[in-house]
Image: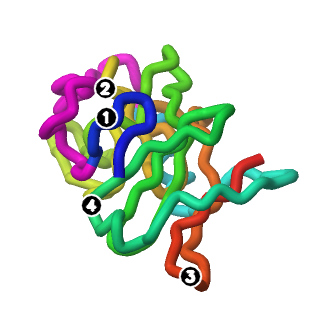
Amino acid sequence: MSDSGTGKTLNTFGNEGNPYAADVDTIDRSCQSVGEVAEAFRIIDEGRKPVRRGSKELVIGPADEIPPGHRVIVDDGRQGIGVFNVDGTYYALKNVCPHFGAPLCRGKVGNTHGPGETHTFEQALDGRVLKCPWHGWEFDVVTGKGLYDAKGRVATFDCHVDDEGNVVVTTP
């Protein structure tokens, strides 16, 4: 599959062959309170998603063309959408970072540090954390929840595999 904007194949969560993704292995959390980060992780643990109204189905393509650990970015004529396969389950996010409008879905996917005691670093959300390629803001691919505070998030879309084996995204 290819990015409709460039025609380039986006087939890994890393930066290989992706000229748009910056090296954002780290994120500066010095401006975040421990309470804000802990609240963001609590929301993710609860699996809360925003409520949706109205819908349109967009067929992305055969599910076997997006294996685990891969993504594809498409455009439905109104917006860019990134479709991610995380451990065999498909998730769709709007391809716009709410911080400054970056092409979010072109960022690296990996893990992050969960909230913990001072001077301790516990890896969390392995294979689920999407880092904005411009400024390194982190989002949970599964829920769209921003990991920088209790309220931030990126838009998510319902995503499933239909009876014909195609990944289908439902957009408002």
Q: Is residue 122 above or below residue 68?
A: above
Mark 1–mark 2 Cα distance, whole angstroms, equals 4 Å
Earlier residue among tags 3 and 4: 4
**Which amino acid does the dot numbered 3 rest on?**
Glu
Residue nearest the observer in this picture, 64 or 120: 64
Instruction: Indicate whether residue 171 is drawn in magenta.
Output: no
Q: Decide: few, some or many residues near mark 2? Use Cα within 10 Å; few <14, some 14-19, many ≥20.
A: many
Q: Decide: few, some or many residues near mark 4? Use Cα within 10 Å; few <14, some 14-19, many ≥20.
A: some
Residue nearest the observer in this picture, 28 or 154: 154
Q: Which residue is mark 1?
A: 107
Residue at x-position 60% and y-position 48%:
156
**Which amino acid does the dot numbered 1 rest on?**
Gly
Which secondary structure, mark 3?
A: loop
Mark 1–mark 4 Cα distance, whole angstroms, equals 13 Å
Badges 1 and 2: C-beta atoms under 8 Å apart?
yes
Q: Which residues are magenta?
A: 11-33
- Nearer to us: label 3 or label 1: 3
Q: Decide: few, some or many residues near mark 3? Use Cα within 10 Å; few <14, some 14-19, many ≥20.
A: few
Q: How many marks?
A: 4
Q: Which residue is mark 4?
A: 69
